[in-house]
Amino acid sequence: MNGSDYYIPAAAMAISLAFKLPALRHNWRDPLLRSVVALLTLAGAVFTFAAPPTIAAVNRWTGIVNVSAPLVYCLITAFSASCLVLMVNWRGGPAERTQGISRRWILGYGAVIVVLIVLFALGETPAERLRDFDTYYANTPYIGHMIALYLLAHLVAAVVMVVLCWRWSLQVRGWLRVGLVIIVIGYIFNLAYDGTKMTAVVARWSGHDLDGLSTYAAPPLASLGALISAMGFVVPLVCQRLSDHWQIWATYRRLGPLWHEVQISAPIGTPSVPMAWWSAAELRVIQRESDIHDGFLHLGPYFDKGLRDDAYDSAVAEGADEETARAVAEAAMVAAAVRARSADPDGMIIGGDEETVLDTSDGPRDLLRISHALRHSPVVQAVRRAVRV
């Protein structure tokens, strides 16, 4: 892998981080958001400082041969801890419990980082190695222990993430499950990275040469695993947001028949509040529901309870369930009231029951059922024809 193979994923992490920073500034106390920012920061740092050009530059700037090795190992260890902490906060639970588990992971991996630095300080690495440090110094006192320790810490984190994500994926559905499965796939690549690295290092311990596994096979596995895992964290958040947005627009569209039906009941000179084209879908739905309820208020004197009861009986006779029959009855009463109001342009209350009101105790769902019945129910169409005659 050349420098661009490392810098491109690092740039992707930086772009993702840039989108998250404004949210962190406004809600920095959110542990889940802090965990996401920490993971993106550390992932970008790992790719940046593991690139051979950066390794050479850091060694040159510090004047310490191979100082990039413990730096990258410490970043990988910190990234492993951030993944575990993010998973703990993502799954949620009692605040004390999640904070306690997160604190233990941070302290444990923090101790590993301190030991890595100490082992490097005790060892000697006179020859600069940009790509094969792990295998070249596998048999060096203290340095070999440092290499084994960081691989072991990374392996533990990968195994725990696979187990946690897989178990959780069996308990949930939807986009969250998809994201967890993607994370599992990403960490399988990380396990493959650990396997190739450890195989090459153990081969060095036993006097054999399998350096190619560590130098050429392991880096692409790590890069691919990190990108897939990051995508697994992002997919549920993005797709769920898109799904919610789609549902809101679907609700707005499905309320259309009822909204158009009651518009005639609005008093002349009281138009609906105009909405800008960029207005949020949530606001549009709220306004449409408000317009519908205003229409109900003006149609109130024209509601006919007897007609509603007859429509309910007709819907039940046609095999509708309780919920559907009630919606059909309400829709029929609305349709008849609209035509009664049209026949009374001066607003004279003719033949209505002022105490009759629509049953919308189930909120927006009742409005959606009524709107659907207005367009599709044969009973409502029959009431329209009868009233027209």
Image (cartoon, rainbow, N blue to C red):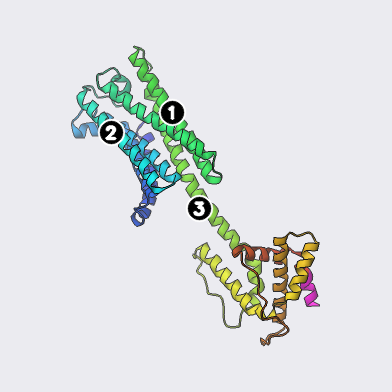
Crowd rating for badge 3 (residues with CA inside 10 Å; few <14, some 14–19, many 20+): few
Query: Which numbered marker is on residue 241?
Result: 3
Q: Is residue 174 above or below residue 301?
A: above
Q: Nearer the viewer, mark 2 or mark 3?
A: 2
Q: Quadrant of the C terminus?
A: bottom right
| Residue named by callout 2 | 111
Q: Is residue 183 above or below residue 138?
A: below
For marks 1 and 2 on the same chain, the one whose residue lies earlier in the sequence = 2
Residue type, numbered disc 2: Ala
Q: In the image shown, does 59 or 120 lie closer to the viewer?
A: 120
Can I make out residue 273 in this image? Answer: yes
Q: Which residues are magenta?
A: 382-389
Residue type, numbered disc 1: Leu
Q: Is residue 290 left or right of residue 104?
A: right
| Residue 233 coordinates in the image, percent (x, y) | 45, 43
| Residue named by callout 1 | 191
| Residue 268 coordinates in the image, percent (x, y) | 60, 83
